[in-house]
Amino acid sequence: MAFMIPVERVVSAEFRGEAMDLMMARDAVIEAIAKVADIGEMARDGVGLRLRVGTEACVRLLVGAPAQPKASAAGTYTVTLIAEETAGLSSDQVQAILAAVRRIPFTTTEMNALRGQMPLTGELPGFLPPRCLSSVAPVLTVHHMTDFLVMVEAVLAMGVPAQAITVLDKGYPYQHTDRVDAHLAKQGIAVWPWADAANALDDHTRRAAALGLRGLLIDDGGYTLPVLLEQRPDLLSHFIGLVEQTISGITRLEPWEGRIPAPIFSVAESRLKATVECYGIADAAIRNLLRLLPEEKLEGQPALVVGFGRIGEHVADVLRSRRMRVAVHDRQLVRLIAAHERGYLTSRCVSTLLRDHRPLLVVGCTGRTGLRGEHAAAIGRDCYLVSTTSRNREFAVAELEQEARQVTDEGVLGTRLHLQSGARVTLVGDGFPINFHHAESLPNMYSDLILASLLVAASTLAAPDHGFAAGHNVTASNRVLESCGLLERYYARFGPESGR
């Protein structure tokens, strides 16, 4: 019977664990289905578990070893859900039911592996003062990748009850985002979509007040403090400060320069972050791009990097190491000169580089909008637009779409704009950051140091005598991060003595 079922009604997912985790996975899928529609009769047969859903529909659930065990890691199991009959269900319900296989919390085996990859973050509660976060209720707006789960465990171990935590889901198509959300929900942690941040912050404030706690913002991209400043200034006094991870988040606060009432611990602008993370992000972005373009030959082709900041300079280096001919644009003359001195083709005009250099790849690294509709006329060949910054602000998508005679959906690759000139411009990942597009971005061993830094910053602001003034505190942030012992532990792990 299975061969008669449309392929879009069959979904599979993998997890790692022990044999005892098979029942956990099965129960998690059934629980997720029950949130979509009533489950009636459940019957086991030789093929799996058959569930009656609603009044007329039925699905079959199979949990077991993968068909090709050698193609998967040891201890891997497969969950498959087949919508055999969908009568009585809406198309949205069918899709939500099929998505249930992606909502399995992480197993003990998987969590142990993650902890092993992130010792700096996981062991941090043992190095900082006991229960150093017990006086705060954090709002975490961090990428929903597997490393985030170890960070949340550390927050709990530092004295924060689960009911005092709010997580904002940034909505990127991460590889494991549904499983991460399911794991958080299992721990009793409130998860809100980032687009509803104002209501999330209101709800968080009420829950924190009931527990006698004040809020603390830990952000990756400026999702929360601008919302408080713009929409809910009445809630500002309930938050003791902000820990910001990214330059784009710092950039979003520029309209309030000199008027920010809370202290900011800027991991984003720290020497620690610049030294360790930037190359990793650039490398991850290009590796993920290569995965999406397996048939494209990059060697010898022209590329344009827009923005020669911390990330952009590494992206340019990685592309040059791939034997591409790289041009660079930056609005800041000092950065443009730096790119020129390093041998890159440069110009103060983006349109000139688009027209004369004819790049196959245009990589946006500005943290702002670097390519607008007015630049479309200078594009004379098929090319790919690739972003490495938060959300889809790197390219003015709406303006570029207005310049196209047709816009087509290219599936996982993104959106294609068919310009009047005949050139086809592909917004890879629909203009969202490529390093997070159906991927885990940085290896966890990279992100370990950064997430641990966020928690050191949080513990600093949670202390009543932190000494940070309202607004930016770049010098103080560097002083804390470089004296807290994290760098010593990182160097011991990856330095010259690490393999001995």
Image (cartoon, rainbow, N blue to C red):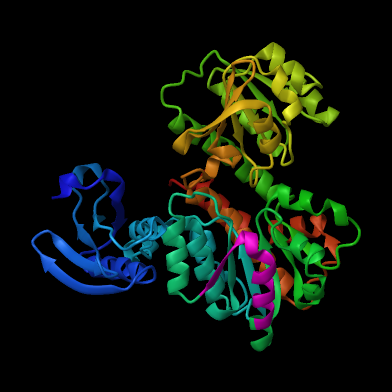
Left or right placement of residue 400 versus residue 68 in this view: right
Q: Residue at x 46, y 71 (%)?
A: 185
Residue 215 image-quadrant placement: bottom right
Q: Nearer the viewer, residue 172 or 470?
A: 172
188, above or below 417, in the image: below
Which image quadrant is residue 235 in? bottom right
Closer to the camera, 77 or 27? 27
Image coordinates of residue 427 in percent, x first then y, are 58, 32
Residue at 77 percent across and 60 percent down: it is: 226
Residue name at image x 83 percent, y 31 percent: 332
Residue at 55%, 54% in the rendered image:
171
> On the rendered structure, is 292 left or right of 301?
left
List the single residue furthest toward the right: 258
Percent position (x, y) of residue 136?
67, 78
Magenta stretch containing residue 188, yes or no? no
Number of labels in the image equals 0
**Chain part drawn in magenta:** 189-206
Please identify the residue farthest to the left as the structure is shown: 46
Residue 377: give x, y in percent of width and height. Answer: 71, 19
Q: Main secondary structure of the magenta part?
A: helix
Identify whether 192 is placed above or below 292.
below
Between residue 152 and residue 175, name the one nearer to us: 175
Residue 276, by quadrant, is top right
Residue 329 makes an appearance in the image: no
Q: Position of residue 175 (x, y in %)?
A: 44, 49
Q: Relative to residue 328, is residue 88 drawn left or right?
A: left
